[in-house]
Image (cartoon, coloured by chain):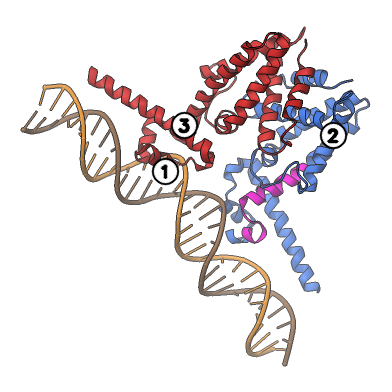
Chain colours: A blue, B red, C orange, D brown
Amino acid sequence: MSVQERKERERAGRQRLIVATARELAEEQGWDAVTTRRLAERIEYSQPVLYSHFRGKREIIGAVALEGATEMAAAVRAAASAAATPRARVTALALAYLDFAERHPAVYDAMFQLDGGLAFAQEDTPEPLKDAFAALLESLGEVAGDGVHPALFTEVFWAALHGLATLTRAGRLPPGDAERRVELLVDRLAAV
Amino acid sequence: MSVQERKERERAGRQRLIVATARELAEEQGWDAVTTRRLAERIEYSQPVLYSHFRGKREIIGAVALEGATEMAAAVRAAASAAATPRARVTALALAYLDFAERHPAVYDAMFQLDGGLAFAQEDTPEPLKDAFAALLESLGEVAGDGVHPALFTEVFWAALHGLATLTRAGRLPPGDAERRVELLVDRLAAV
DNA sequence: GAGGAAATCCTAGCACCGCTAGACAATCGA
DNA sequence: TCGATTGTCTAGCGGTGCTAGGATTTCCTC
Protein backbone atom coordinates (compact mmCIF):
# COMPACT_ATOMS: atom_id res chain seq x y z
CA MET A 1 0.00 0.00 0.00
CA SER A 2 3.00 2.26 -0.34
CA VAL A 3 1.76 3.70 -3.58
CA GLN A 4 -1.52 4.73 -2.06
CA GLU A 5 0.24 6.25 0.89
CA ARG A 6 2.47 8.30 -1.34
CA LYS A 7 -0.56 9.50 -3.26
CA GLU A 8 -2.25 10.54 -0.11
CA ARG A 9 0.81 12.41 1.02
CA GLU A 10 0.96 14.23 -2.28
CA ARG A 11 -2.71 15.02 -2.07
CA ALA A 12 -2.34 16.38 1.43
CA GLY A 13 0.61 18.44 0.32
CA ARG A 14 -1.33 19.93 -2.51
CA GLN A 15 -4.19 20.72 -0.18
CA ARG A 16 -1.81 22.59 2.10
CA LEU A 17 -0.46 24.37 -0.95
CA ILE A 18 -3.93 25.52 -1.90
CA VAL A 19 -4.67 26.89 1.55
CA ALA A 20 -1.28 28.56 1.88
CA THR A 21 -1.55 30.10 -1.56
CA ALA A 22 -5.07 31.36 -0.93
CA ARG A 23 -3.90 32.95 2.28
CA GLU A 24 -0.86 34.44 0.61
CA LEU A 25 -2.92 35.90 -2.20
CA ALA A 26 -5.47 37.26 0.24
CA GLU A 27 -2.82 38.97 2.35
CA GLU A 28 -1.20 40.41 -0.73
CA GLN A 29 -4.21 41.72 -2.58
CA GLY A 30 -7.27 41.08 -0.45
CA TRP A 31 -9.85 38.33 -0.62
CA ASP A 32 -11.52 39.87 -3.65
CA ALA A 33 -8.42 38.98 -5.59
CA VAL A 34 -8.63 35.36 -4.53
CA THR A 35 -10.55 33.95 -7.47
CA THR A 36 -10.56 30.30 -8.33
CA ARG A 37 -8.81 31.08 -11.60
CA ARG A 38 -5.98 33.05 -10.05
CA LEU A 39 -5.60 30.54 -7.27
CA ALA A 40 -5.46 27.66 -9.73
CA GLU A 41 -2.88 29.46 -11.81
CA ARG A 42 -0.66 30.11 -8.80
CA ILE A 43 -0.61 26.49 -7.72
CA GLU A 44 -0.08 25.53 -11.35
CA TYR A 45 -3.13 23.34 -11.65
CA SER A 46 -6.44 23.82 -13.37
CA GLN A 47 -9.51 25.13 -11.62
CA PRO A 48 -11.35 21.83 -11.16
CA VAL A 49 -8.49 20.52 -9.04
CA LEU A 50 -9.55 22.95 -6.33
CA TYR A 51 -12.94 21.31 -6.28
CA SER A 52 -11.45 17.89 -5.72
CA HIS A 53 -10.10 19.20 -2.42
CA PHE A 54 -12.82 21.64 -1.35
CA ARG A 55 -16.50 21.96 -1.99
CA GLY A 56 -15.98 25.50 -3.12
CA LYS A 57 -14.35 28.80 -2.37
CA ARG A 58 -16.15 29.02 0.95
CA GLU A 59 -14.44 25.91 2.23
CA ILE A 60 -11.06 27.30 1.25
CA ILE A 61 -11.78 30.40 3.28
CA GLY A 62 -12.82 28.14 6.13
CA ALA A 63 -9.54 26.27 5.95
CA VAL A 64 -7.61 29.53 6.18
CA ALA A 65 -9.77 30.52 9.12
CA LEU A 66 -8.97 27.33 11.01
CA GLU A 67 -5.27 27.81 10.39
CA GLY A 68 -5.63 31.36 11.68
CA ALA A 69 -7.49 30.25 14.79
CA THR A 70 -4.68 27.91 15.72
CA GLU A 71 -2.11 30.64 15.28
CA MET A 72 -4.14 33.21 17.15
CA ALA A 73 -4.60 30.84 20.07
CA ALA A 74 -0.87 30.33 20.21
CA ALA A 75 -0.14 34.04 19.97
CA VAL A 76 -2.59 34.87 22.73
CA ARG A 77 -1.26 32.16 25.00
CA ALA A 78 2.33 33.20 24.40
CA ALA A 79 1.57 36.82 25.24
CA ALA A 80 -0.38 35.92 28.35
CA SER A 81 2.19 33.50 29.68
CA ALA A 82 4.85 36.18 29.54
CA ALA A 83 2.97 38.38 31.99
CA ALA A 84 3.04 38.00 35.75
CA THR A 85 -0.24 39.31 37.12
CA PRO A 86 -3.79 38.59 35.96
CA ARG A 87 -4.21 42.18 34.94
CA ALA A 88 -0.98 42.21 32.96
CA ARG A 89 -2.07 39.00 31.30
CA VAL A 90 -5.30 40.58 30.15
CA THR A 91 -3.51 43.61 28.77
CA ALA A 92 -1.00 41.44 26.98
CA LEU A 93 -3.79 39.28 25.61
CA ALA A 94 -5.69 42.26 24.29
CA LEU A 95 -2.65 43.73 22.61
CA ALA A 96 -1.72 40.37 21.12
CA TYR A 97 -5.24 39.93 19.78
CA LEU A 98 -5.32 43.33 18.13
CA ASP A 99 -1.81 42.87 16.85
CA PHE A 100 -2.77 39.60 15.23
CA ALA A 101 -5.78 41.20 13.58
CA GLU A 102 -3.66 44.05 12.28
CA ARG A 103 -0.81 41.93 11.00
CA HIS A 104 -2.96 39.25 9.40
CA PRO A 105 -6.02 41.12 8.19
CA ALA A 106 -6.93 38.57 5.55
CA VAL A 107 -6.78 35.71 8.01
CA TYR A 108 -8.79 37.70 10.50
CA ASP A 109 -11.38 38.37 7.82
CA ALA A 110 -11.53 34.68 7.00
CA MET A 111 -12.16 33.96 10.65
CA PHE A 112 -14.75 36.58 11.48
CA GLN A 113 -15.89 38.65 8.53
CA LEU A 114 -16.26 36.22 5.67
CA ASP A 115 -18.43 33.19 5.38
CA GLY A 116 -16.17 30.20 5.73
CA GLY A 117 -19.08 27.90 6.38
CA LEU A 118 -17.89 27.23 9.91
CA ALA A 119 -20.10 26.53 12.88
CA PHE A 120 -19.53 28.60 15.98
CA ALA A 121 -20.59 28.15 19.54
CA GLN A 122 -22.04 24.73 18.87
CA GLU A 123 -21.13 21.13 19.44
CA ASP A 124 -19.82 20.65 15.92
CA THR A 125 -17.62 23.69 16.11
CA PRO A 126 -14.16 22.74 14.81
CA GLU A 127 -11.55 22.19 17.48
CA PRO A 128 -9.26 25.12 16.55
CA LEU A 129 -12.11 27.57 17.04
CA LYS A 130 -13.04 26.11 20.39
CA ASP A 131 -9.41 26.22 21.40
CA ALA A 132 -9.00 29.86 20.38
CA PHE A 133 -11.93 30.74 22.60
CA ALA A 134 -10.41 28.61 25.33
CA ALA A 135 -7.17 30.55 25.04
CA LEU A 136 -9.07 33.76 25.68
CA LEU A 137 -11.00 32.17 28.51
CA GLU A 138 -7.88 31.05 30.32
CA SER A 139 -6.70 34.57 30.98
CA LEU A 140 -9.99 36.42 30.94
CA GLY A 141 -11.73 34.04 33.26
CA GLU A 142 -9.35 35.11 35.98
CA VAL A 143 -10.69 38.64 35.97
CA ALA A 144 -14.37 38.01 35.39
CA GLY A 145 -15.15 39.06 38.92
CA ASP A 146 -17.42 37.52 41.53
CA GLY A 147 -20.74 36.22 40.36
CA VAL A 148 -19.93 36.70 36.70
CA HIS A 149 -19.77 33.63 34.55
CA PRO A 150 -16.27 33.42 33.04
CA ALA A 151 -17.58 32.43 29.62
CA LEU A 152 -20.00 35.34 29.54
CA PHE A 153 -17.27 37.72 30.54
CA THR A 154 -14.98 36.31 27.87
CA GLU A 155 -17.67 36.78 25.27
CA VAL A 156 -18.13 40.42 26.17
CA PHE A 157 -14.42 41.15 26.30
CA TRP A 158 -13.87 39.32 23.06
CA ALA A 159 -16.69 41.26 21.41
CA ALA A 160 -15.06 44.49 22.48
CA LEU A 161 -11.73 43.42 21.02
CA HIS A 162 -13.42 42.30 17.85
CA GLY A 163 -15.18 45.61 17.56
CA LEU A 164 -11.98 47.53 18.05
CA ALA A 165 -10.18 45.37 15.52
CA THR A 166 -12.77 45.64 12.79
CA LEU A 167 -13.75 49.26 13.26
CA THR A 168 -10.13 50.34 13.36
CA ARG A 169 -9.18 48.46 10.26
CA ALA A 170 -12.23 49.59 8.33
CA GLY A 171 -11.27 53.19 9.04
CA ARG A 172 -14.24 53.62 11.32
CA LEU A 173 -12.05 54.58 14.24
CA PRO A 174 -9.20 57.06 14.08
CA PRO A 175 -5.87 55.25 14.09
CA GLY A 176 -3.40 55.94 16.84
CA ASP A 177 -5.03 55.97 20.27
CA ALA A 178 -5.26 52.21 19.97
CA GLU A 179 -3.29 51.64 23.11
CA ARG A 180 -5.30 54.16 25.07
CA ARG A 181 -8.45 52.37 24.02
CA VAL A 182 -7.06 49.05 25.18
CA GLU A 183 -5.97 50.59 28.43
CA LEU A 184 -9.46 51.93 29.05
CA LEU A 185 -11.02 48.64 28.14
CA VAL A 186 -8.84 46.63 30.48
CA ASP A 187 -9.11 49.17 33.29
CA ARG A 188 -12.86 49.06 33.27
CA LEU A 189 -13.80 45.57 32.23
CA ALA A 190 -11.30 43.55 34.21
CA ALA A 191 -12.23 43.07 37.84
CA VAL A 192 -8.94 43.06 39.69
CA MET B 1 -38.56 76.34 -15.37
CA SER B 2 -41.50 74.25 -14.20
CA VAL B 3 -40.70 71.45 -16.59
CA GLN B 4 -37.18 71.13 -15.32
CA GLU B 5 -38.39 71.16 -11.76
CA ARG B 6 -40.85 68.40 -12.43
CA LYS B 7 -38.11 66.35 -14.04
CA GLU B 8 -35.86 66.86 -11.09
CA ARG B 9 -38.62 65.78 -8.73
CA GLU B 10 -39.19 62.65 -10.75
CA ARG B 11 -35.49 61.93 -10.80
CA ALA B 12 -35.22 62.37 -7.06
CA GLY B 13 -38.20 60.10 -6.60
CA ARG B 14 -36.65 57.42 -8.69
CA GLN B 15 -33.42 57.73 -6.77
CA ARG B 16 -35.32 57.17 -3.53
CA LEU B 17 -37.03 54.22 -5.15
CA ILE B 18 -33.69 52.68 -6.02
CA VAL B 19 -32.36 53.03 -2.50
CA ALA B 20 -35.56 51.79 -0.89
CA THR B 21 -35.74 48.82 -3.24
CA ALA B 22 -32.11 47.91 -2.67
CA ARG B 23 -32.70 48.00 1.05
CA GLU B 24 -35.87 45.97 0.76
CA LEU B 25 -34.20 43.34 -1.37
CA ALA B 26 -31.23 43.19 0.98
CA GLU B 27 -33.44 42.73 4.03
CA GLU B 28 -35.43 40.06 2.25
CA GLN B 29 -32.66 37.98 0.74
CA GLY B 30 -29.35 39.45 1.84
CA TRP B 31 -26.99 41.75 0.01
CA ASP B 32 -25.70 38.95 -2.20
CA ALA B 33 -29.10 38.89 -3.82
CA VAL B 34 -28.94 42.60 -4.57
CA THR B 35 -27.57 42.47 -8.08
CA THR B 36 -27.90 45.30 -10.51
CA ARG B 37 -30.06 43.14 -12.72
CA ARG B 38 -32.52 42.18 -10.01
CA LEU B 39 -32.60 45.70 -8.67
CA ALA B 40 -33.27 47.12 -12.12
CA GLU B 41 -36.04 44.62 -12.69
CA ARG B 42 -37.74 45.49 -9.41
CA ILE B 43 -37.81 49.20 -10.12
CA GLU B 44 -38.96 48.38 -13.63
CA TYR B 45 -36.12 50.11 -15.39
CA SER B 46 -33.10 48.79 -17.22
CA GLN B 47 -29.72 48.38 -15.58
CA PRO B 48 -28.02 51.46 -17.01
CA VAL B 49 -30.56 53.68 -15.29
CA LEU B 50 -28.96 52.75 -11.98
CA TYR B 51 -25.70 54.15 -13.24
CA SER B 52 -27.27 57.47 -14.07
CA HIS B 53 -28.01 57.87 -10.37
CA PHE B 54 -25.05 56.13 -8.76
CA ARG B 55 -21.48 55.47 -9.78
CA GLY B 56 -21.99 51.82 -9.05
CA LYS B 57 -23.31 49.28 -6.63
CA ARG B 58 -21.01 50.56 -3.90
CA GLU B 59 -22.65 53.96 -3.94
CA ILE B 60 -26.07 52.37 -3.62
CA ILE B 61 -24.88 50.53 -0.53
CA GLY B 62 -23.53 53.81 0.76
CA ALA B 63 -26.89 55.48 0.27
CA VAL B 64 -28.61 52.74 2.28
CA ALA B 65 -25.96 53.15 4.95
CA LEU B 66 -26.61 56.88 5.26
CA GLU B 67 -30.33 56.27 5.55
CA GLY B 68 -29.61 53.73 8.25
CA ALA B 69 -27.32 56.07 10.14
CA THR B 70 -30.05 58.67 10.34
CA GLU B 71 -32.54 56.12 11.62
CA MET B 72 -30.13 54.65 14.10
CA ALA B 73 -29.30 58.08 15.50
CA ALA B 74 -33.00 58.72 15.99
CA ALA B 75 -33.58 55.33 17.61
CA VAL B 76 -30.70 55.79 19.99
CA ARG B 77 -31.77 59.29 20.95
CA ALA B 78 -35.35 58.21 21.49
CA ALA B 79 -34.32 55.38 23.75
CA ALA B 80 -31.93 57.53 25.74
CA SER B 81 -34.36 60.39 26.20
CA ALA B 82 -36.89 58.04 27.74
CA ALA B 83 -34.54 57.15 30.59
CA ALA B 84 -34.01 59.21 33.70
CA THR B 85 -30.50 58.57 34.98
CA PRO B 86 -27.23 58.55 33.08
CA ARG B 87 -26.83 54.87 33.76
CA ALA B 88 -30.33 54.05 32.57
CA ARG B 89 -29.66 56.10 29.46
CA VAL B 90 -26.58 54.05 28.66
CA THR B 91 -28.44 50.79 29.12
CA ALA B 92 -31.30 51.99 26.98
CA LEU B 93 -28.86 53.17 24.34
CA ALA B 94 -27.07 49.84 24.25
CA LEU B 95 -30.27 47.88 23.94
CA ALA B 96 -31.57 50.20 21.25
CA TYR B 97 -28.34 49.85 19.31
CA LEU B 98 -28.37 46.07 19.41
CA ASP B 99 -32.06 46.01 18.65
CA PHE B 100 -31.50 48.13 15.57
CA ALA B 101 -28.72 45.85 14.39
CA GLU B 102 -30.88 42.80 14.90
CA ARG B 103 -33.98 44.18 13.27
CA HIS B 104 -32.22 45.75 10.29
CA PRO B 105 -29.31 43.44 9.61
CA ALA B 106 -28.94 44.45 5.99
CA VAL B 107 -28.85 48.13 6.85
CA TYR B 108 -26.38 47.44 9.62
CA ASP B 109 -24.20 45.55 7.16
CA ALA B 110 -24.35 48.43 4.74
CA MET B 111 -23.20 50.75 7.49
CA PHE B 112 -20.40 48.72 9.00
CA GLN B 113 -19.62 45.50 7.19
CA LEU B 114 -19.79 46.34 3.52
CA ASP B 115 -17.86 48.82 1.52
CA GLY B 116 -20.16 51.69 0.82
CA GLY B 117 -17.32 53.95 -0.14
CA LEU B 118 -17.96 56.20 2.82
CA ALA B 119 -15.34 58.10 4.74
CA PHE B 120 -15.34 57.68 8.49
CA ALA B 121 -13.74 59.70 11.23
CA GLN B 122 -12.58 62.37 8.84
CA GLU B 123 -13.56 65.87 7.84
CA ASP B 124 -15.42 64.73 4.76
CA THR B 125 -17.42 62.18 6.67
CA PRO B 126 -21.08 62.53 5.66
CA GLU B 127 -23.26 64.33 8.16
CA PRO B 128 -25.53 61.38 9.06
CA LEU B 129 -22.55 59.33 10.14
CA LYS B 130 -21.15 62.12 12.25
CA ASP B 131 -24.57 62.61 13.77
CA ALA B 132 -24.96 58.94 14.61
CA PHE B 133 -21.69 59.05 16.48
CA ALA B 134 -22.83 62.26 18.14
CA ALA B 135 -25.99 60.52 19.30
CA LEU B 136 -23.88 57.91 21.01
CA LEU B 137 -21.58 60.54 22.45
CA GLU B 138 -24.43 62.48 24.01
CA SER B 139 -25.34 59.70 26.40
CA LEU B 140 -22.02 57.92 26.68
CA GLY B 141 -20.01 61.06 27.34
CA GLU B 142 -21.90 61.43 30.59
CA VAL B 143 -20.43 58.25 32.00
CA ALA B 144 -16.91 58.43 30.60
CA GLY B 145 -15.52 59.08 34.03
CA ASP B 146 -12.92 61.55 35.24
CA GLY B 147 -9.88 62.02 33.08
CA VAL B 148 -11.27 59.97 30.25
CA HIS B 149 -11.90 61.72 26.99
CA PRO B 150 -15.62 61.33 26.14
CA ALA B 151 -14.89 60.60 22.49
CA LEU B 152 -12.40 57.89 23.36
CA PHE B 153 -14.85 56.34 25.78
CA THR B 154 -17.57 56.44 23.16
CA GLU B 155 -15.33 54.74 20.66
CA VAL B 156 -14.58 51.90 23.05
CA PHE B 157 -18.17 51.45 24.09
CA TRP B 158 -19.31 51.60 20.52
CA ALA B 159 -16.72 49.02 19.50
CA ALA B 160 -18.02 46.70 22.20
CA LEU B 161 -21.58 47.10 20.96
CA HIS B 162 -20.47 46.57 17.41
CA GLY B 163 -18.62 43.44 18.39
CA LEU B 164 -21.64 42.08 20.21
CA ALA B 165 -23.90 42.91 17.29
CA THR B 166 -21.78 41.31 14.61
CA LEU B 167 -20.61 38.27 16.55
CA THR B 168 -24.11 37.51 17.70
CA ARG B 169 -25.62 37.80 14.28
CA ALA B 170 -22.87 35.78 12.64
CA GLY B 171 -23.57 32.97 15.04
CA ARG B 172 -20.25 33.49 16.78
CA LEU B 173 -21.93 34.08 20.12
CA PRO B 174 -24.69 31.93 21.56
CA PRO B 175 -28.03 33.70 21.28
CA GLY B 176 -29.99 34.42 24.38
CA ASP B 177 -27.85 35.89 27.13
CA ALA B 178 -27.78 39.09 25.11
CA GLU B 179 -29.24 41.12 27.91
CA ARG B 180 -26.88 39.70 30.45
CA ARG B 181 -24.00 40.67 28.22
CA VAL B 182 -25.31 44.21 27.93
CA GLU B 183 -25.78 44.38 31.65
CA LEU B 184 -22.22 43.34 32.26
CA LEU B 185 -20.93 45.78 29.69
CA VAL B 186 -22.78 48.73 31.16
CA ASP B 187 -21.96 47.75 34.74
CA ARG B 188 -18.27 47.69 34.07
CA LEU B 189 -17.65 50.28 31.40
CA ALA B 190 -19.88 53.07 32.60
CA ALA B 191 -18.41 55.13 35.39
CA VAL B 192 -21.38 56.10 37.53
C1' DG C 1 6.73 -5.92 -20.71
C1' DA C 2 1.74 -5.40 -22.61
C1' DG C 3 -3.14 -4.42 -21.98
C1' DG C 4 -7.06 -2.99 -19.67
C1' DA C 5 -9.00 -0.64 -15.59
C1' DA C 6 -8.97 3.10 -12.67
C1' DA C 7 -7.71 7.25 -11.08
C1' DT C 8 -6.40 11.91 -12.37
C1' DC C 9 -6.51 16.08 -14.76
C1' DC C 10 -7.80 19.60 -18.24
C1' DT C 11 -10.59 21.87 -21.87
C1' DA C 12 -14.64 24.01 -22.61
C1' DG C 13 -18.71 25.90 -21.18
C1' DC C 14 -22.75 27.23 -18.09
C1' DA C 15 -25.24 31.04 -15.78
C1' DC C 16 -24.37 34.82 -13.46
C1' DC C 17 -21.89 39.25 -11.97
C1' DG C 18 -20.79 44.71 -12.41
C1' DC C 19 -20.54 47.87 -15.81
C1' DT C 20 -20.72 50.45 -20.51
C1' DA C 21 -21.00 51.73 -25.63
C1' DG C 22 -23.99 52.94 -28.95
C1' DA C 23 -28.47 52.71 -31.13
C1' DC C 24 -33.06 54.18 -30.51
C1' DA C 25 -37.15 56.76 -28.81
C1' DA C 26 -39.33 60.31 -26.33
C1' DT C 27 -39.43 65.05 -25.11
C1' DC C 28 -38.28 69.61 -25.45
C1' DG C 29 -37.67 74.65 -27.28
C1' DA C 30 -38.00 77.39 -31.38
C1' DT D 1 -43.73 71.13 -37.14
C1' DC D 2 -39.03 70.42 -37.00
C1' DG D 3 -34.32 69.79 -35.13
C1' DA D 4 -31.81 69.12 -30.99
C1' DT D 5 -31.49 67.37 -26.67
C1' DT D 6 -32.42 64.26 -23.24
C1' DG D 7 -33.56 59.92 -21.69
C1' DT D 8 -33.70 54.92 -22.01
C1' DC D 9 -32.83 50.39 -23.72
C1' DT D 10 -30.51 46.50 -26.15
C1' DA D 11 -26.51 44.15 -26.51
C1' DG D 12 -22.15 42.97 -25.07
C1' DC D 13 -17.55 43.18 -22.51
C1' DG D 14 -14.55 40.77 -19.30
C1' DG D 15 -14.95 38.76 -15.10
C1' DT D 16 -16.95 35.36 -11.38
C1' DG D 17 -17.88 30.39 -9.11
C1' DC D 18 -18.58 26.03 -10.57
C1' DT D 19 -19.14 21.55 -13.50
C1' DA D 20 -19.72 18.04 -17.37
C1' DG D 21 -17.24 15.12 -20.29
C1' DG D 22 -13.34 13.75 -22.64
C1' DA D 23 -8.26 12.99 -22.69
C1' DT D 24 -4.31 11.40 -20.36
C1' DT D 25 -1.64 9.40 -17.17
C1' DT D 26 -0.93 5.88 -13.69
C1' DC D 27 -1.66 1.62 -11.76
C1' DC D 28 -2.38 -3.43 -11.30
C1' DT D 29 -2.71 -7.88 -13.51
C1' DC D 30 -1.36 -11.29 -16.62
Q: Amino acid at mark 1?
A: Arg
Residue A132 location, x and y as percent? Answer: 80, 40
Residue B93 location, x and y as percent? Answer: 66, 18
The alpha-carbon separation of the residues under discs 1 and 2 comes to: 47 Å
Q: Which residue is mark 2?
A: A137
Residue B104 location, x and y as percent? Answer: 57, 30
Which mark, by number, is residue B22?
A: none
Toward the viewer: B25 or C18?
A: B25
Q: Which residues are magenta?
A: A50-69
The alpha-carbon separation of the residues under discs 3 and 2 comes to: 41 Å
In this rendering, does residue B99 appear at all?
yes
Q: Which residue is mark 1?
A: B37
Q: Residue furthest right?
A: A84
Pointer 3 chain: B
Residue A60 among magenta residues: yes
At a point 63% along the width and 12% down the height, the residue shown is B82
At a point 66% along the width and 11% down the height, the residue shown is B83
**Left or right position of A90 against B137:** right
- Specify which label sits upstream in the sequence, 1 or 3: 1
Pointer 2 chain: A
Q: Amino acid at mark 3?
A: Ile
Residue B76 among magenta residues: no
Mark 1 is surrounded, within 10 Å at the Cα level, by few (under 14), some (14 to 19) or many (20 or more) other residues, namely some
**Left or right position of B166 against B120:** right
The alpha-carbon separation of the residues under discs 1 and 3 comes to: 14 Å
Determine the secondary structure under disc 1: helix
Looking at the rendering, which quadrant does residue D3 occupy?
Answer: top left
Q: Is residue A24 above or below residue A48?
A: above
Q: Which residue is mark 3?
A: B60
Pointer 1 chain: B
